[in-house]
Amino acid sequence: MTADIPLRCGDSAREARAPWYAAGLRFSCVGCGRCCGNDPGTVAFTSVEEERMARCLGMDTAGFRARYTWRKYGILSLREIENYDCVFLRREGTRARCKIYPVRPAQCRAFPFWPEVMKNERTWNSYSLSCPGMNGGVLHSIAEINGYIGQ
Ligand code: SF4
Ligand code: SF4
């Protein structure tokens, strides 16, 4: 009679929970600006982020809110200009930069590690068709990615 081999419950449970991006994902922004414009969208922000953005521009929050924000799809968002670019996007030829980059909202910092992008490998690869920074560059660990997603 052989001794029972203990089940490695912890390991199998961990494997079952491992997300599809467990080995990490490569991403480095190339500054094309596509995710900051081209299509209608929203850029949400917290009141702390609003204060930071206003301070960066030398404004008070009331002035910032009146000039640079609006309600869209039921949420308070940064404004867009006529071509749907974010009001803070500055295009220079094929490059683009954010006028408030150091104080941009968490929504901007987290891209492309957004829940809707990270649903599965198919959604990730689908978004990568419009973001040339995805699937190349720096390898981001699962811990880092989960931090962005909020897990
Ligand atoms: S689409 Fe991708 S590469 Fe282009 S600015 Fe946005 S994050 Fe950077
Ligand atoms: S705040 Fe900056 S990073 Fe965010 S969408 Fe606008 S231009 Fe892009």
Image (tube, grey):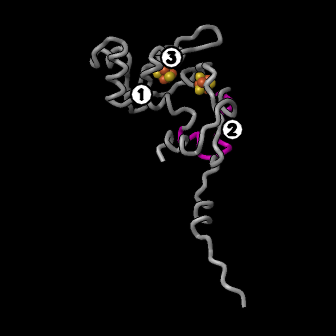
**Mark 2 or mark 1, which has the lower sequence index?**
1
Q: Residue at image x 50%, y 14%?
A: 82
Disc sitting over residue 72 in the figure:
1
**Mark 1 or mark 3, which has the lower sequence index?**
1
Q: Residue 139 is drawn in which quadrant? A: top right
Q: Indicate the amino acid at tag 3.
A: Cys
Q: Which residues are magenta?
A: 114-131
Crowdedness near tag 2: few (<14), some (14–19) or many (≥20) residues, C-alpha within 10 Å: some
Disc sitting over residue 48 in the figure:
none
Badges 3 and 2: C-beta atoms under 8 Å apart?
A: no
* Disc 2 target residue: 125
Q: Indicate the amino acid at tag 2.
A: Asn
Q: Residue 36 is drawn in which quadrant? A: top right
Badges 2 and 1: C-beta atoms under 8 Å apart?
A: no
Residue 27 percent coordinates (x, y)? 63, 32
Which residue appears farthest toward the right when viewing the image?
1
* Disc 3 target residue: 98
Cβ(mark 3) to ligand 2 < 8 Å?
yes
Q: Indicate the amino acid at tag 1.
A: Lys
Which residue appears farthest toward the bottom when viewing the image?
1
